Amino acid sequence: MTKAGFKRLSSIVSNFKDLRIAVFGDLMLDRYVKGSVKRISPEAPVPVVRVTSESSVCGGAANVAVNLAALGARPVLVSVAGRDQAAEELSSLLAAAGVPAGALVRDGAFRTIEKTRVIAEHQQVVRFDREFPALLGPAAKRAALASLAEVLQEGCGALILSDYGKGLLEPATIKAAIALAAKRGVPVFVDPKVEHFQLYRGVACITPNTAEAFGGMRLTQADGQPAAEALGAAIMKKLALRTLLITQGEHGMTLFVRKGAAVTPVHIPTRAREVFDVTGAGDTVISTLALTWAAGAAPEEAALAANFAAGIVVAKLGTASASVEELLESAKSWLTA
Ligand SMILES: Nc1ncnc2c1ncn2[C@@H]1O[C@H](COP(=O)(O)OP(=O)(O)OP(=O)(O)O)[C@@H](O)[C@H]1O
Ligand SMILES: [Mg+2]
C-alpha cells in the first residue's frame, strides 16, 4: 500500500457511516457448546462432553450485516426468521451489534436455522443443524421480497446477496432481487452458491472462493495462479460480469476487472500476520467490498480493503468482524516506503 493509496482509503472510509447497505439472504444462528472430555460413554463409543460454556453468534446473512455495522455503516437485513427462541436470540445479538431488524420477516410457520457445534478440548466433535427449507413457504418469500423492495426504494448504496443455499435465495427470488436493485440503480454483490451460479449474470461482482469458482463452472479444481486466472476470465465472460473476486484462502484473492474487451487479473496476497480462525472470512470480504465500493472506491481499492479486513478477522477467534480503526491500522502497517 502506497502513502497516496492510504490517504485515499482514509477518505473513503470516512463515508462509511452514512451508507445504507441492504443484505438479502439466509439467516442463521451459530451456536457453540464447549466442554471437556474425561471419558468415553458407556452407552456408545463416543466421548462424553462435560459442558462448560454455551454461546451463540449471528450467522449467514446476519453475520454479513454485523460486519457492515462493525465498519460503521447502516446495514439493513432482509430475511426470514421464525417466531422461536433462536429468532429471539438473533434479535438480541443483532441489536447488540447495532443492526436494525425492522426489515426482517417473522413467519410463524418457519423455523429459524440453527447450527450447533460441540467443541471439546478445542476440537469440534460434532455439529448438528436444524434446518427445514420446506417450512419456508411462498408467502414468506413474497413478504421478504416486498420488504426488500421497500428498503431499496428508501435508497441503498449496495445490495448484498448472501447465498448459503438454505432456501430463501432460489431462482425466482434471486431474479426478483436483482431486478429490484436494477430498477433503483443499486449495484449487486453476491457471495455465491455453486448451484445458482448462472443466475448472477450481470451483477456488479461475485466473490466465490476457489472451490466455488470451479464448481460453479462445472470444472474440476486445478491448482496454481495460471489456472485461477483462466478460470476467472471464463467466469467473467460466461456471466457478463464487470468484476469478479475469487478468494483463495491463505493465498489471498484475485480480482478480475473488465476494461473494454480485455479482462485484467490482479492478485492480492494475504494480509494476515497470524491466523487463528478463518470462519466468516468470506462474510467479511463481501461486506467490506460492497461497502467500500459504495463509498466511492474503485474495484481495486475495494478488493484491497476487503483483503485487509479479512486479514484482521482471521487473526481473531470465533466469527469476527473488523472496525474502521483496525482496517486503517492494518493498511498503515503494510505501507511501503
Ligand atoms: N489461512 C489464511 N491466511 C490468511 N488469510 C486468509 C486465510 N484464510 C482466509 N484468509 C483471508 O480471507 C479471505 C477469504 O477467505 P476464503 O477464500 O477462505 O473465503 P471463503 O471460503 O468464502 O470463507 P468462508 O469459510 O467464510 O465462506 C482470503 O481472500 C484471505 O484474504
Ligand atoms: Mg464463503
Image (spheres, rainbow, N blue to C red):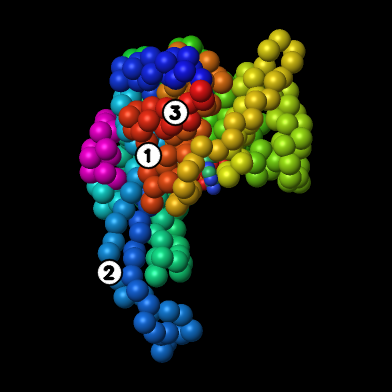
Query: Who's the residue at 68% across and 12% down the image?
Result: 259
Foreground disc of the pair 2, 3: 3
Residue type at mark 1 is Ser
Residue 327 image-quadrant placement:
top left
Can you tell me whether the CB of the residue at mark 3 lies under 8 Å from the nearest atom of ligand 1? Answer: no
Q: Are marks 1 and 3 in contact (CB under 8 Å)?
A: no
Query: Who's the residue at 30% across and 20% down the image?
Result: 17
Real-space CA distance between mark 2 and mark 3, rounded to the nearest whole angstrom: 38 Å
Can you tell me whether the CB of the residue at mark 1 lies under 8 Å from the nearest atom of ligand 1? Answer: no
User: Disc 2 marks which residue?
Assistant: 52
Residue 96 image-quadrant placement:
top left
Question: Residue 99: percent from the left, percent from the top?
Answer: 28, 33
User: Disc 1 marks which residue?
Assistant: 321
Q: Is the stretch drawn in magenta largely helix, strand or loop?
A: helix
Q: Earlier in the sequence, mark 1 or mark 2?
A: 2
Image check: 252 left or right of 75?
Answer: right
Foreground disc of the pair 1, 3: 3
Does residue 329 sit above or below 116 in this rendering?
above
Q: Which residues are magenta?
A: 90-102
Real-space CA distance between mark 1 and mark 2, rounded to the nearest whole angstrom: 25 Å
Q: Earlier in the sequence, mark 1 or mark 3?
A: 1
